Amino acid sequence: MQTPHIPVLLDEVLESFSNVDEGYFVDCTLGYAGHSSEILAKFPHLKHIGIDRDDEALAFSKKRLEPFEERSTLYKGTFATVLPTLEEAPVMALLADFGVSSLQLDKKERGFSFTSETLDMRMDAHAHLSAYEVVNEYPKEKLEYIFDAYGEVRSYRKLAAAVVEARAKAPIESAKALSEIAKEVIPAGGKIHPATLMFQAIRIEVNNELGEIEGLLDAIEAKHYKGEVVSLITFHSLEDRLVKNRFKKWSTACICDPQAMRCTCGKNHALGKALSRKPITASKEELKINPRSRSAKLRSFRFNTDGK
């Protein structure tokens, strides 16, 4: 079966789960099952749960994972909503790859591409909100906010004004037309397309991506297992900051007020520890064969074996 996707940081992900010897592995962002198929093959003692909100991804992965069907169960939905409902236990390994899948990027009809003739960007094709509504209906102030907060676009005000001016003449129907607006406002330069950060911001808004990550972290914190390993792959600073800060919270032993004269909490509140001090990034070898891995960062956390 031809696989249109190269899973990022695969060797590093496999290494993070090398000491997991029982229970379930949950792939919260199943996609094309690139990571899942390799983990199922390498760890025959683990059972698998795959979660995705994309019907096309689920159909492809179901076919791809047929050799492991006795150990694999797939669920449709967002990981933040599905994970708390899982009855399978114990979950000893959990992976989330927050990047947009190749399935979505490469199919122009999905509206993620700069050259797409549609304007969609929904990870779940049945979701109500699409990029079309965001671009053509959001007030200028709200566009400014998402371009600034989710895209960290320096000229966010100028870009929002350009979008509003363009749509006043005629609705912006395609991602291609939207990217042309960005080109007029943001000077070309460097390795990334002028519309990259704007598209990121709109995609995050359409799919509530940061809210979903927060929901996933909340679900993990509320229900984790002794010795469970969580490996999360992020692709931009907003995602990485959420993961980094939550791992820091989970690793903190003392929860006393920072202004307190001395510790009175017992310094035994750490839930576990991060498996590396800094995020793991792609090797030079991987960057050569998979340019999309250049911004990927992997952070892994192991919960205490004593359940604290």
Image (spheres, rainbow, N blue to C red):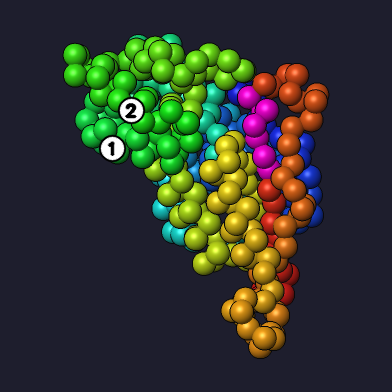
Amino acid marked by disc 1? Glu
Vertical side of 241 occupied by 1: above or below: above
* Local crowd size for mark 1, using a 10 Å CA cut-off: few (<14), some (14–19), many (≥20): few
Which span is picked out in magenta?
292-298
Q: Which residue corresponds to the image point at 19% horizontal and 14% vertical from the top-left?
A: 170
Residue 19 coordinates in the image, percent (x, y): 79, 54
Q: Say which of 50 and 256 sits in front.
A: 256
Q: CA distance from mark 2 to mark 1?
A: 8 Å
Instruction: Check residue 296 for magenta coloring.
Output: yes
Q: Position of residue 279 (x, y in %)?
A: 72, 45
Where in the figure is residue 155, as x and y percent of width and height?
A: 43, 28
User: On the picture, is 85 further left or further right than 191?
Assistant: left
User: Which residue in the protein does label 2 denote?
Assistant: 160
Q: Amino acid at mark 2?
A: Ala
Q: Which residue is mark 1?
A: 141
Please tell me which residue is depicted at 48% across the width and 36% down the height of the picture: 152
Q: Residue at coordinates 68% horizontally, 48% vertically from top-left?
A: 299
* Of pointers 2 and 1, the one earlier in the residue sequence: 1
Q: Residues within 10 Å of mark 2 (few under 14, many from 20)?
A: many
The part of the image, by quadrant, that contains residue 115 is top left
Q: Is residue 93 visible?
A: no
Q: Which mark is residue 166?
A: none
Nearer-the-camera pick, 114 or 18: 114
Q: Position of residue 36 (x, y in %)?
A: 63, 38
In this rendering, position of residue 216 left or right of residue 172: right
The N terminus: image quadrant:
top right
Residue drawn at x 40%, y 13% as measured from the top left: 184
Local secondary structure at mark 2:
helix
> Are dots 2 and 1 in contact, CB under 8 Å?
yes
